[in-house]
Amino acid sequence: MRAEPAIRRLQELGNAELEQLAALTVDCVEGGASIGFMQPFTLDMARAFWRRIGRDVAAGERALLVAEDEQGICGTVQLVLALPENQPHRADLCKMQVHRRMRRRGLGELLVRAAERLALECGRNLLVLDAVTNGDAARLYERCGWIRVGDVPNFALYPDGRPCGTTYYYRSLEPAPMQAPRRARGSADS
Ligand SMILES: CC(C)(COP(=O)(O)OP(=O)(O)OC[C@H]1O[C@@H](n2cnc3c(N)ncnc32)[C@H](O)[C@@H]1OP(=O)(O)O)[C@@H](O)C(=O)NCCC(=O)NCCS
């Protein structure tokens, strides 16, 4: 029986991890995922992307999770923590990727749950993301309880140049703080 992939947080990106993450991103783009890149998308372009991410991770501006099986990194997801100072409680979830060899076995859901736990550990209780409208990822987030905000038609392109719509989602991880009860009009000390 295959072991479940182990998920861990990377605080910095070594060469081995960078290579495996680059290969994972190339696999996803080759599979047609709209995750910010166009075809032709090479390993070198993926390495350059992950070097930039590595710098943000080392600076504490992003939190990075990877999932590993016996063949190496097979999944990843990020939280963008560097947001305007009036949004200290919030993070953006992005760049969720599961290698095609590991799809449809629940790893995507494990990564979403792990990212939600990590957000709370980082002091963030409101998450926002966008995903291709009605795509595999959109179904995943809806299954995990994310709230659909709305769709933007023709927001982005698939790697082959076809347009795709984007749907925004949010997830509130803890109940909103209790509001002070409103006083009735005309109460004695109003
Ligand atoms: C979106 C993505 C992350 C989902 O990853 P995944 O690991 O396949 O996700 P899950 O396995 O949790 O769920 C996928 C499907 O498999 C099903 N599934 C999960 N475990 C299963 C199992 N043991 N047996 C059968 N089906 C299973 C789920 O119910 C789900 O079904 P659905 O297609 O009807 O929604 C993956 O498709 C991916 O990396 N896509 C390319 C990159 C991308 O688009 N990223 C999103 C950026 S916003």
Image: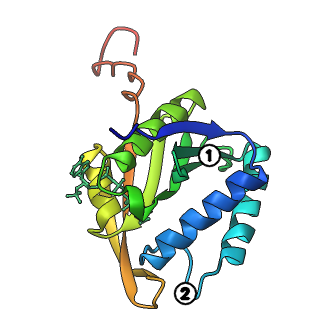
Q: Ligand 1: does it lie within 8 Å of the C-beta at label 2? A: no
Residue 89 can be seen in this image: no
**Ligand 1 location (quadrant):** bottom left
* Labelled pair 2, 1 in contact (Cβ < 8 Å): no
**Secondary-structure class at tag 2:** loop
Measured as percent of width and height from the top left, residue 183 is found at 33, 18
Q: Ligand 1: does it lie within 8 Å of the C-beta at label 1? A: no
Marking on residue 64: 1
Marking on residue 99: none
**Front position in the image: 123 or 67:** 67
**Disc 2 to disc 1, how far (Cα)?**
25 Å
Q: Residue at x 29, y 44 (%)?
A: 144
**Front position in the image: 190 or 82:** 82
Residue 143 can be seen in this image: yes
**Front position in the image: 106 or 116:** 106
Q: Residue at x 27, y 19 (%)?
A: 184
Q: Residue at x 72, y 53 (%)?
A: 16
How many neighbours does mark 1 have within 10 angstroms: few (below 14), some (14-19), or many (20 or more)?
many
The answer to whether 148 appears left or right of 9 in the picture is left
How many marks do you count on the picture? 2
Mark nearer the N terminus (2 vs 1): 2
Mark 2 residue type: Gln
Above or below 42: residue 130:
above
Spot the residue most to the top. Answer: 188
Measured as percent of width and height from the top left, residue 66 is found at 56, 46
Q: Quadrant of the N terminus?
A: top left
Q: Residue at x 30, y 49 (%)?
A: 105
The answer to whether 134 appears left or right of 92 in the picture is left
**Secondary-structure class at tag 1:** strand
Above or below 10: residue 131:
below
Above or below 142: residue 35:
below
Residue under circle 2? 39
